Image (tube, helix red, strand yellow):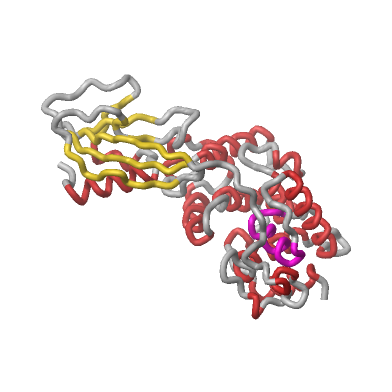
Amino acid sequence: MSFTTTILHWFQENGRALPWRETRDPYAIWLSEIILQQTRIDQGLPYWERFMQRWHTVEELAAASEDEVLREWQGLGYYSRARNLHHAAKQVVEMGEFPQTLEGIKSLKGVGDYTAAAIGSIAFDLPAAVVDGNVYRVLARHYGIATPINTTEGKKEFTALAQELLLPALNRDGLGAGLFNQAMMDFGAIQCTPSNPLCTSCPLQETCIALREGRIEELPVKQKTLKIKERHLTYIYIRYKGETAIHRRPAGDIWQGLYEPWLTDTVPSGAVLLRKDVKHVLTHRVLYADFYLWEPAERPLLPDDYIWIQEADINQYGIPRLIEILLKELDRSYGKD
């Protein structure tokens, strides 16, 4: 039995039942792909359900404000995805319909080769193979490929191989690409996992080079690139007559468009330390945050981009996960007036 046929048979028996697989609506499929970028399915599924319930169509999502979208996204991280999602929704509305070609789909903000192939194959039967972490892992192990997956050469090699394996999955009408792509993703997520893969029950064990040569833990190969940087932040939560001050983070930095308390290098006299060196890990940096509560006798003067709001209203603003953690510490320690 060929690799492609084996994968499809496996998927028929073991594929995950997911709500966006029960529709051909490109909006629902696109939304799921954006949410699941760098997010586990069990974490992303409730967000997909809430987005679909609140904004039933791409037109409704496009009509929402950025603050509303960021607030609904809160907790998922990588907030540029939410801003791109909102921008792309407006693009689709301007186009008059969801694009039905790979190039058209890739023209949407935040959509790259992988996401375009996933949407195009599942929603429109476009014969384009997806290549994500799961696919890299399955192909690298099965075929014993040591080319680093994060190099130009590696991306070309794996994409060409995935495309070659996709072709036998197409029926006489040219359909089946979406099925094969979902099968490959699920096989990597369930069977050929990053650690402790289920090799003893794998239907490909007889032809898997990595298993035969004892290289399961070595593949796929990834070149080391970026150095992780550290960053220290000091936040002052100001409590003054039931109000607090926040500001919206600017473009060109982490958490663009989200809100945070007073960020400063100087701790005012009388401020009480609640947490020190709270560690928060992002993709290419590690944050360490100190968090203070300050209850001044008079309203302090702050930079012009800070606004005063009722403390009870802070949940109406999109805030980063780190700030959410710090505010929970505040509630535990001091509560609200």
Residue 162 is one of the magenta-drawn residues = no
- Residue occupying the point 74% across, 67% down: 142
In this orientation, which residue lies closer to the viewer: 285 or 184?
285
User: Where in the figure is residue 32, as x and y percent of width and height?
Assistant: 58, 53
Horizontal arrangement in the rendering, residue 231 relative to residue 21 (left or right): left
Q: Does 24 appear above or below 97?
A: below
User: Where in the figure is residue 82, as x and y percent of width and height?
Assistant: 51, 41
- Magenta segment boundaries in residue numbering: 130-144
For residue 311, say whether it is visible. yes
- Residue occupying the point 50% across, 49% down: 51
User: Where in the figure is residue 307, as x and y percent of width and height?
Assistant: 30, 27
Question: Quarter-wise, where is residue 308 in the image?
Answer: top left
Q: Determine the residue located farthest toward the left in the rendered image.
A: 297
For residue 60, say whether it is visible. no
Horizontal arrangement in the rendering, residue 309 relative to residue 211 (left or right): left
In this orientation, which residue lies closer to the viewer: 72 or 39?
39
Pick the quarter of the image with the C terminus.
Answer: top left
Question: Quarter-wise, where is residue 58 in the image?
Answer: top right
- Residue occupying the point 77% across, 57% down: 162
User: Where in the figure is residue 264, as x and y percent of width and height?
Assistant: 30, 28
Horizontal arrangement in the rendering, residue 316 relative to residue 293 (left or right): right
Q: Does 145 appear above or below 100?
A: below
Q: Determine the residue located farthest toward the right in the rendered image.
A: 172
Horizontal arrangement in the rendering, residue 269 relative to residue 105 (left or right): left
Magenta stretch, overall SS: helix
Pick the quarter of the image with the N terminus.
Answer: bottom right
